[in-house]
Image (cartoon, rainbow, N blue to C red):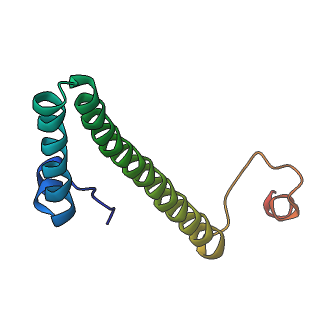
Amino acid sequence: MGYAPLTLSKALRTPLGTALAALTVIVLVYSVLVTARILAGVLFVALVALGYIAYRLLAAVEAVADGHQRLADAREHEAFSRSSNAPPSSDAGDANDPDDAATEP
């Protein structure tokens, strides 16, 4: 089964997510109320949001790569099982096959 990345609500329930959310709120409140520099707080919040988006993007790329790997494994297994257990094919269009020439009247 594939890896499911944390959703935002689940990430906020983890100790690291709770601490990061609290730090983000504290930095935003400090930058707005104490130093009166709104841009500093907004930039910090934007960096945290971009970090989360990068994490989700990396998890999505990993899931796609995992899916491709499972698909390739299934096709390889299918090709191997066909080549080892397959009955001989009955291609009438192969004129160079000596078995076909022997069975014709």
The residue sitting at 31% across, 66% down in the picture is 1
Instruction: List x then y, in percent, for residue 13.
Output: 10, 60
Left or right? Give the position of 24 relative to 87: left
Left or right? Give the position of 77 relative to 15: right
Asked whether residue 6 appears in the rendered view, the answer is yes
The residue sitting at 71% across, 52% down in the picture is 91
The residue sitting at 17% across, 48% down in the picture is 8
Quadrant into which the C terminus falls = bottom right
Instruction: List x then y, in percent, for residue 10.
Output: 13, 56
Instruction: List x then y, in percent, for residue 102.
Output: 85, 64
Determine the image quadrant of residue 26. Answer: top left
Instruction: List x then y, in percent, for residue 104.
Output: 80, 57
Closer to the camera in the image, 45 or 64: 45
Closer to the camera in the image, 18 or 36: 36
The residue furthest bottom is 84
Closer to the camera in the image, 48 or 99: 48
The residue sitting at 21% across, 53% down in the picture is 20
Closer to the camera in the image, 86 or 13: 13
Residue 67 against residue 74 in the figure, above or below: above
Left or right? Give the position of 66 relative to 6: right
